[in-house]
Image (cartoon, coloured by chain):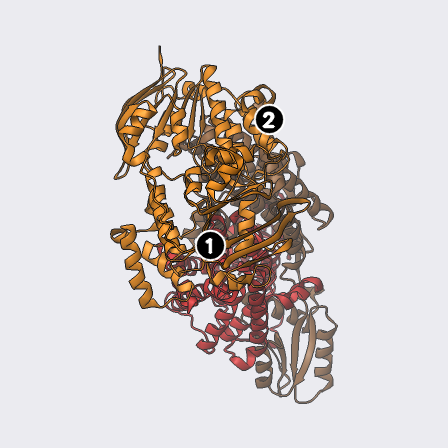
Chain colours: A orange, B red, C brown
Amino acid sequence: MMDAIVVNSVSKSYGKVQALSDVSFSVGKGEVFGLIGPDGAGKTSMFRILCSLLLPDAGTATVDGYDVVKQMREVRRRTGYMPGKFSLYQDLTIEENLKFFATLFGTTVDEGYDTIKAIYSQIERFKDRKAGALSGGMKQKLALSCALVHQPSVLFLDEPTTGVDPVSRKELWEMLLSLKESGITIVASTPYLDEVRCCERVAFLDQGKVRGIGTPDDILTQFASIFNPPGIEHGKDTEVKDDNVIEVEHLVKAFGDFHAVDDISFNVKRGEIFGFLGANGAGKTTAMHMLTGLNQPTSGTGRVVGFDIRTEYEQIKKHIGYMSQRFSLYEDLTVAENIRLFAGIYGMDADEVERKMDEVLKQLKFEDHKNDLVGSLPLGWKQKLAFSVSIFHDPGVVFLDEPTGGVDPATRRQFWELIYDAAHRGITIFVTTHYMDEAEYCDRISIMVDGKISALGTPDELKQRLHQPDMDHVFTYLARQATRSSD
Amino acid sequence: MTLKHLIRKEFLQIRRNSFLPKLIVMFPIVVMCLMPWVMQMDVKNVVVDVVDIDHTVESQRLVQQIAASNYFIFGGQKDTYAEAMKDIEKGSADIILEIRDGQYLIAANAVNGTKGSMGSVYLSQIVSAPFSASSAISVLTLYNKQQDYKLFMIPALFAIVMMLMTGFLPTLNIVGEKEAGTIEQINVTPVSKWSFILAKLIPYWLIALFVITVCLLLAWIVYGITPAGPLWLIYVLAMLLALFFSSFGLIVSNYSDTMQQAMFVMWFFVVCIMLLSGLFTPTRSMPEWAYMTTYINPMRYFIDAIRTIFIRGGGLYETAHQVLALAGIGALMGCWAVQSYKKNS
Amino acid sequence: MKQFIAFVIKETKHILRDKRTMLILFGMPVVMMLLFGFAITTDVKNVRTAVVTSEMSPRTQQAVERLAQSEYFIITQTVNTPQEAERLIRRQKADMALVFTQNRGMQIMVDGSDPNMAQQWTTYARQTLSPVNFHLSPVNSRLLYNPQMKSAYNFVPAIMGMLLMLICAMMTSISIVREKEKGTMEVLLVSPVRPLMVIIAKAVPYLVLAFGILISILLMSRYVLGVPIAGPLFWILAVSTLYILLALSLGLLISNVAQTQLVALLMSAMVLLMPVVMLSGMIFPVESMPQVLQWLAALVPPRYYIQAMRKLMIMGVGIREVAHEVAVMAGMTVVLLAIALKKFNVRLE
């Protein structure tokens, strides 16, 4: 069998930073190959070199037998690429985006429709909506549709499922595996273990070096400490009090005649870890925006830490912490400066801030990076820092909107240790996530489907009630009942 | 208290930026050193072609006078009017002086109306000097006795520098936070609208203070021009103008989604405000409708006031009207800026 | 070809969807034309004049009436001493004062802040006041091309030069850099489409837009401002096309250098806008500048375009007379385009 991709001792550095050093691997024709590794391991640089977008400093690479340096045009004719930060054209509609990319790749939407049907059919109903108005996961689905509408002989996908809900991720991988049957070679990177297992072989990259290549099971066992950290024990000793921190009744948010959040009611008790789950576009972020006082509800009532979300939202803001989907600390400020800023905003005393900052940084093992610019930190670190900042002022409740998107398993585990620690101190946690293992960590979860809450209870209760073996199946079972997919 | 932290943040961000500190220092310097030389509206170096058909002693003397004048450059003798016209069409001459039978014809290229008419007036003064009895009317020029155009333009340059620095930078700042997503994080904190907006404005006022100081120093060092009126009043005016433009910039950015949009909208208004302020051409020459708009144009009050202080040596008494108007408009814009910033939609 | 058309359509949609920018793009020419055509003038009118006299005699009466009857001056106040008049001028209540002295003399006291206007005011005042009959003078003045001295004649070509440069260079550079910033450029580069085609397809809608604006400026100047189009229309359009190409190449060059929209914006503003307004002879005549600046001005492309348009449109000369300007612009286009294409990155970094 001829190899579709051969990489031979490729090195690449940006100034002093060595992104790739002496990387070699090969991918057979029609193989599904995974590139895995923590953030900053050099995966994106590898993809770019293979797409002929970057020149390697040393070594050679061929794609479909063509050299990526010398035969750029041949390579580009044969490859499809979906970059990690692919963001489409915000001011074009879904359909226009898809049509444009189809034409760009010399095909039409009709021709490619079968390939992308599984994913595109979920957003097709909203084809006249502008891409800029879509939620993160929906955008990702559209981007995937655009990248897959043609059938290249080699397909490169750089973390294609960040922010996509589990059901859609499954559908995507089913789709990819069917593409493989038509002989397409696929190279994908992903932080999700279930996706890693879908690959035939994976290469584990760390700090620009290949640490191991083999079947997913081999690699995952070999590097179990990184990929499969032992689950954390939820110390049930945290006291869940009986008073409600969040009370929501018949909450509705309508945009025109579209009800993004459609009559939801629930309570969250003090000290609880409340998982707020739902497919992309089910209305999670909208609901969270109303609870944090960023948006006014259309109708219904809600109280957070005892204040009305409609009228006393400025009061609420004094007693909550918030970490948004997008990383939102100031990248051009240092770690310490960010902490001082946000602590200062909440009116904390300067001496106390310094004392507590040292404590927090020690806990995060960040002491050496106190004066580093936040922009220079790896993603996982940033997320941990953002969380620590959001609970720095000891709020009554903290809202976390997909805090672990795109983060590797080991870092996610550390993140949840931080969450447990905060819950232990009596901070109520309100969290959304697409990782079902994380859902199991929650005290109670709700699952939103089409703007409504279709299930609410402890993870065990839900599994029993719906007769499903684990949360993954619970979620799939409920989400498949959805009739719409949009926010 | 929170204000202090927010302001510190703004300064840190400005300092960290690789471009802004350089811009803040270099921009006023470059503008003050270059622009006064560019902004010369006075008519100079007008090229005169002479078509001398008479060839008298008189006409010879005239040519010498033209060549000696500050205003004119002698473009050459041409045999016929048509030949001289060629020069005009090519753009190598501006005025033709034809001398025939003791009559003088001055034909000026008036595409640029000011240049054409002023040139022909100057030229006709030279030509007709021997014929007109010396006028009984004397002229006393007040204030700008050397007729130095730089003295007229330098206060206006202050206005331009202030406008660009305090108008555009805050605009880019807020839209930048919107695009980066950090504004959402700020919106869920209990920061009051006032402190957030003030924290955005105060750094630019301090920058404005710095910039105006640099401008004043440069005007003194490079051009030897110092204000005839009180210095403190110039600072007051500068602060009021900064208040207006920074508030205006924030308003534009509050209503814009992208940097491009904000820049275009800003640019549009800035051009209108600048052109209708009397900075380049007198407000009084404008038609009625255009003149009416100057009543709400803060730049007009600033220009009027700063020229009164700088050139005419006026003080607070002479400029009270402008200072009040500027303060009023500035305060109004400040309130609007706070009002238009929405923490909850 | 199909890809090319799809590209152009996509780019057109980007432009059309951004309503606010569109409004500015088309509103700008209209407002600029109105402002420059009507509001930005140095006409002498409404000059507020104070009269300084201790008592009204028939002689003073006559002089004052002459001024008051002229369209240029309005008599605002009568005061007793020159000091009072000076205070009025300082407070911006008057621009000029007519002082009658004891010994039958007259003096014009003028606010010299603006040397140009002061000069014009005194000239007009003298002419109005002096009894000399100008018909007897052997001097005969004629103002060519623009006898009414309308400022629009001067500014219309300048506005064309500025706006075309702004739209073509700034908008194309920003739209290319935006794709870089958003990550879509990576996909476009990896697609089978030739990079050159991406660039050409990006330029086409802006070319059309520029033409639309050019035509609307010409129509406005002809029918609203009453500026005649004296020269051959064909050459006006041909030279404009050359200039648009020049501007597009400049935009392309900026997009190669700039990595973020902000940098592209600032570069366009500093490299394009400032020099265009200041050094192109649009407002300030290049001849009055010091030599060094004149050399610098020689590098500013709109300078040549504005000069060529003034000649073609207003003076109505033939293409032969603007050969020099056209040659310089053509040379600049070739050089800029060559550099831009050579520097165009088919890879990242």
- Residue A331 visible in the displayed image: no
Q: Are marks 1 and 2 in contact (CB under 8 Å)?
A: no
Rendered view: C34 above or below C184? below
Q: Amino acid at mark 2?
A: Ile
Q: Where does the image place residue A298, in percent across and percent down from the top left? A: 64, 53
Query: Which residue is denoted by mark 2 in the rendering?
Result: C5
Q: Is disc 1 surrounded by few (<14), some (14 to 19) or many (20+) residues within 10 Å?
A: many
Nearer to us in this view, B39 or B202: B202
- Residue A263 visible in the displayed image: yes
* Residue drawn at point x = 61 percent, y = 21 percent: A110
Q: Looking at this view, name the residue that lies furthest to the top.
A: A1
Q: Where does the image place residue A283, in percent across and percent down from the top left? A: 57, 44
- Horizontally, is C165 left or right of C349 in the view? right
Tell me the SS state at disc 2: helix
Q: Where does the image place residue A356, in percent across and percent down from the top left? A: 31, 61
Nearer to us in this view, A88 or C320: A88
Q: Where does the image place residue A142, in percent across and percent down from the top left? A: 54, 32
Q: Quadrant of the C terminus of chain A?
A: top right
Parent chain of label 1: B
- Horizontally, is C30 left or right of A118 in the view? right
Tell me the SS state at disc 1: helix
Q: Is disc 2 surrounded by few (<14), some (14 to 19) or many (20+) residues within 10 Å?
A: some
Nearer to us in this view, C242 or B343: B343
Can you tell which mark lies on residue B313? none
- Horizontally, is B189 left or right of A382 in the view? right
- Horizontally, is C228 left or right of C309 in the view? right
Can you tell which mark lies on residue B185? 1
Q: Quadrant of the N terminus of chain A?
A: top left
Parent chain of label 2: C
Determine if marks 1 and 2 fall on one subunit. Answer: no
